[in-house]
Image (cartoon, rainbow, N blue to C red):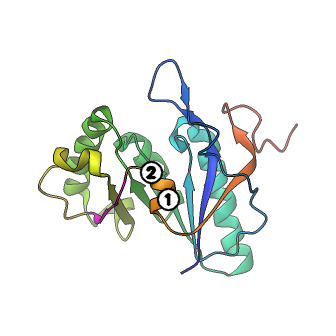
Amino acid sequence: MSSLRLFVTRIIKDEWPNKVVGNDTVPDGIVTSFDYEEIIICGGEPFAFKRNLERLLQALFMLRKSTGIERKVLVETSKCDFWAIDDVIKLCDGIICTPKTKENMVWFKQLNNELLKRQNIGKFAGKTMKLNILPSTRDFFPENLRVWEVQYLPDDNIETAVAGDFCRIAELWESDQGWYDLTR
């Protein structure tokens, strides 16, 4: 399956002050085509700019509708915030969670508990829920992961561990202002 990992922001918002991923993590190539079977929106933290994320998901949905080409659109997050995911899950085909810190694990455990209650009902019905487990976090996961497609990654560098093309949008998100604003 052809897959695109679409990098949208360097910002990691769940840390204060706002940290950014290093330049070596940002792909050089700018996306020129969405002709993929699967598009994974990733970054820093795409949910740091939820309004931009919603706009991008809506644009990808309209692209799917106008071309008739089925594309699976997933959002990758390390924070794993249930309420943020709950807000956007209707706009995408699923979520990929990759908790990277102990703080992320606190969020993940809440997310996992909420999904266990809501599995296959409402807006979560039929959604893809993938979980990447890094070697550094293996010992911190709860036992019941039945709602997840679990993948154990060989190392903590997700950019090298996950297959597919890796490109970025032309203007990386630094705020919720201005991106994809048709009025400017």
In front of the other: 26 or 79: 26
The 10 Å Cα crowd at callout 2, few under 14, some 14 to 19, many 20 or more, is: few
Q: Residue at x 74, y 74 (%)?
A: 66
In the image, residue 42 lies in the stretch drawn in magenta: no
Say whether marks 1 and 2 touch (CB < 8 Å).
yes
Where residue 120 sits, quadrant-wise, is bottom left
Q: Is residue 93 above or below residue 16?
A: below
Mark pair 1, 2: CA separation: 6 Å
Q: Residue at x 51, y 41 (%)?
A: 47
Left or right: where 101 falls relative to 112: right
Residue type marked 2: Asn
Q: Residue at x 46, y 46 (%)?
A: 87
Q: Is residue 116 above or below residue 146?
A: above
Residue 92's x, y, as percent?
52, 61
| Residue 10 circle label | none
The 10 Å Cα crowd at callout 1, few under 14, some 14 to 19, many 20 or more, is: few
Q: Which residue is mark 2?
A: 157
Q: Residue furthest left?
A: 143
SS at mark 1? Answer: helix
| Residue 160 circle label | 1
Q: Which residues are magenta?
A: 148-155
Q: Residue furthest right?
A: 184
Q: Residue at x 56, y 40 (%)?
A: 50
